[in-house]
Image (tube, rainbow, N blue to C red):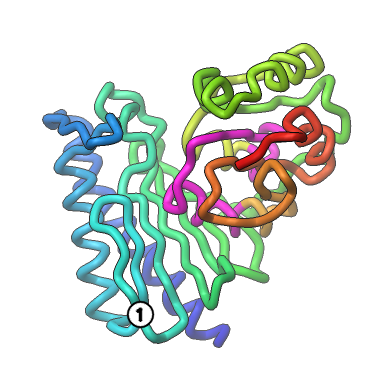
Amino acid sequence: MKSDIKDRYCLVLEWLERIGKKTLEWFEKGTEIEWKPDHSPVTIADKEAEHELRELISEFFPNDGLLGEEFGDQQGSSGFRWIIDPIDGTRSFTRGIPMWAMLVGLEYRGQMVAGVAHAPALGKTWHACKGEGAYVGDRRIQVSRQANLGPSQVYYSGLKWFQKAGVEEGFLRLSRECPQLRGFGDFYGFVLVAQGSGEAMIEYGVKPWDIAALFPIIEEAGGKMTDWEGGVNLKRSDVLASNGLVHEKTRQFFQGFKA
């Protein structure tokens, strides 16, 4: 089984490097924006990247399942499922901001076993395979050892999401406890935690494709990733990633939240 996971993991690293070059071209020249029913943006770059990934996966692993942001769910029989966000951070992508990434998570029988976050405009790839550590490029990364919230860097997506979740007061209390809050949304806050550049990333409003690839990266870097109640469920909209040492201290500000 380990070789089956590794084969897929190595291939997706190769695929994203190649597809990312095309996606970067769209980013640099600009593209028209369409708006989905949920008022989120999508571009031809999103659609083409996911379509090409799906074709490659179906060619090499025809019995694997697929779940993608743009083209939905496709059942499989192998126990493996690929969870794809072709461009995480489409709003940044459409405004010429380089903090967007192509996310691919690999799930086996309900467990996330590998994840890749390829950021072409930043020239970096964060990746991890279960049991083998987490990396940015060829460099192994680890979470920080900071155990106190006061000096911690804590990342978040935007205040509106905490208002929507009904936990604005908890967020404001956290901001008073930890003044080093920074609004690095989408994938970027998570990988900053994984590489030790911050202690926690808290977000609301996520979908499975937003976070699936990030679970292995955070965990293999020595961190922890759960929902706000301390469980693990890709279908929930609330998520907290941390170095593990400040996890419960951060989560306590959102206790009582009900999904």
- Which quadrant of the structure image shows residue 131? bottom right
Residue displayed at 16% across by 33% down: 34
Q: Position of residue 108 (x, y in %)?
A: 52, 75
The local crowd at label 1, few if under 14, some if 14 to 19, many if 20 or more residues have their Cα within 10 Å, is some
Seen in the picture, residue 130 relative to 117 is either above or below; the reply is below
Residue 66 falls left or right of residue 56: right
Residues drawn in magenta? 193-217
The residue that disc 1 covers is 76
Viewer-side residue, 22 vs 204: 204
Seen in the picture, residue 151 relative to 35 is either above or below; the reply is above
Residue displayed at 65% across by 39% down: 258
Q: Position of residue 92 (x, y in %)?
A: 34, 27
The residue under label 1 is which amino acid type? Gly
Residue 207 falls left or right of residue 182: left
Residue 230 falls left or right of residue 85: right
Residue 257 within the segment the image draws in magenta: no
- Which quadrant of the structure image shows residue 18? bottom left
Residue 213 within the segment the image draws in magenta: yes
Under circle 1, the secondary element is loop
Q: Where is residue 119 in the image (x, y as percent from the top left)?
A: 39, 43
Farthest-out residue, right: 148
Residue displayed at 14% across by 42% down: 44
